[in-house]
């Protein structure tokens, strides 16, 4: 496994694979890797000949400077995990490499940009799509793999790809959960032992909605899910919604395809998101 720090070196290395018409996959990450990330690498290996994983904590997507500061960066641990997973290439640039000078970025990501996470973290998805476009330009992959846990992020990246008419396929991969149901996240490291227990309520509420989806009206499902979360100690609900997965607008018609339940809450000092496909 090779670790590359510059775009020029990355392009040089990938050129021979492109000439040989090998399929290249990109798994973009911000590091602090866990089994969820490894599952993305493993799925990418089934689709592509060469798997590139990027590790870059992107400053433009953090709406709170403190959040950027405390984001975990266990680089040695990450490299060992990728090596074990059989990743081919790690792209680990410095901030100056990705942002060599001041730049303006603003594209139309559609109305869904301003809903849910977009409402709580204004400008977040502009920062996400800005760095993902840079990574796509650097790697020029045939496919890119993202986790379903960041459901809205995947939708925004698809919209960005459509906006620029990029010739690559975006693949969303299933959420990987701990044995007790908690969605794996780099942020879980910040949870205290009691927070960790309280956080289980998010999956509990989602699972309730999934289990009762066919038998109860959407309004009642939402009411119950919110009640489950609001009854938990140390958990502050930001939103719980059942939405059309293509628009993220609330949806009460169960026959709408691609329905998804999405939740965000602050558990102690840590903000967590999760979701579950319903039909």
Image: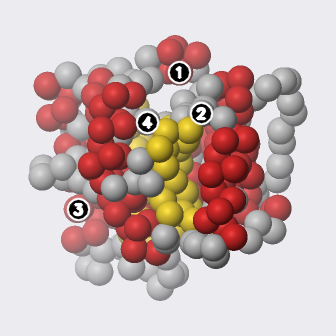
Q: Nearer the viewer, residue 223 or 61?
A: 61
Q: Is residue 209 above or below residue 184?
A: below
* Mark in front: 4 vs 3: 4
Residue drawn at the location 76% of the way across and 66% of the way down: 166
Q: Which residue is mark 4?
A: 31
Q: Nearer the viewer, residue 85 or 193?
A: 85
What separation in Å lies between label 2 and label 3 (alpha carbons)? 45 Å
Name the spot of residue 247 as percent of width and height, x first.
63, 65
Q: Can you identify the residue that label 3 sits on?
A: 208
For the residues labelled 1 and 4, the Cα–Cα distance comes to: 13 Å
Earlier along the polypeptide chain: callout 1 or callout 3? 1
Whether tag 1 and tag 2 are in contact, CB under 8 A, the answer is: no
Q: Which mark is residue 5?
A: 2
What is the spatial separation of the Cα atoms under label 4 and label 3, in whole angstroms?
Answer: 32 Å
Do residues under tags 2 and 4 come within 8 Å of each other at their CB atoms? no
Name the residue located 82 percent from the left edge and 62 percent from the top edge.
164
Q: Earlier in the sequence, mark 4 or mark 3?
A: 4
């Amino acid at each position: 496994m090779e670790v590359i720090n510059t775009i020029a070196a990355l392009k040089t290395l990938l050129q021979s694979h492109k000439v040989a018409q090998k399929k290249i996959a990109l798994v973009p990450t911000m590091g602090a890797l866990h089994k969820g990330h490894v599952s993305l690498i493993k799925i990418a290996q089934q689709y592509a000949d060469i798997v590139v994983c990027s590790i870059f904590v992107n400053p433009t997507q953090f709406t709170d400077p403190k959040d950027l500061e405390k984001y975990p960066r266990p680089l040695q641990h990450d490299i060992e995990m990728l090596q074990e997973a059989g990743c081919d290439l790690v792209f680990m640039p410095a901030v100056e490499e990705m942002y060599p000078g001041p730049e303006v970025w603003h594209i139309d990501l559609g109305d869904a940009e301003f809903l849910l996470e977009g409402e709580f973290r204004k400008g977040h998805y502009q920062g996400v799509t800005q760095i993902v476009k840079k990574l796509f330009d650097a790697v020029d992959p045939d496919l890119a793999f993202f986790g379903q846990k960041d459901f809205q992020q995947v939708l925004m990246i698809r919209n960005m790809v459509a906006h620029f008419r990029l010739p690559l396929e975006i693949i969303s991969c299933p959420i990987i959960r701990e044995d007790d149901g908690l969605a794996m996240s780099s942020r879980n490291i910040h949870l205290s032992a009691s927070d960790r227990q309280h956080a289980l309520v998010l999956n509990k509420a989602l699972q309730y909605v999934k289990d009762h989806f066919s038998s109860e009206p959407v309004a009642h499902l939402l009411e119950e899910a919110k009640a489950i979360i609001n009854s938990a100690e140390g958990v502050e609900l930001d939103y719980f919604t059942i939405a059309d997965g293509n628009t993220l607008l609330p949806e009460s018609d169960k026959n709408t395809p691609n329905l998804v339940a999405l939740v965000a809450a602050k558990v102690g000092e840590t903000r967590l998101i999760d979701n579950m496909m319903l039909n």
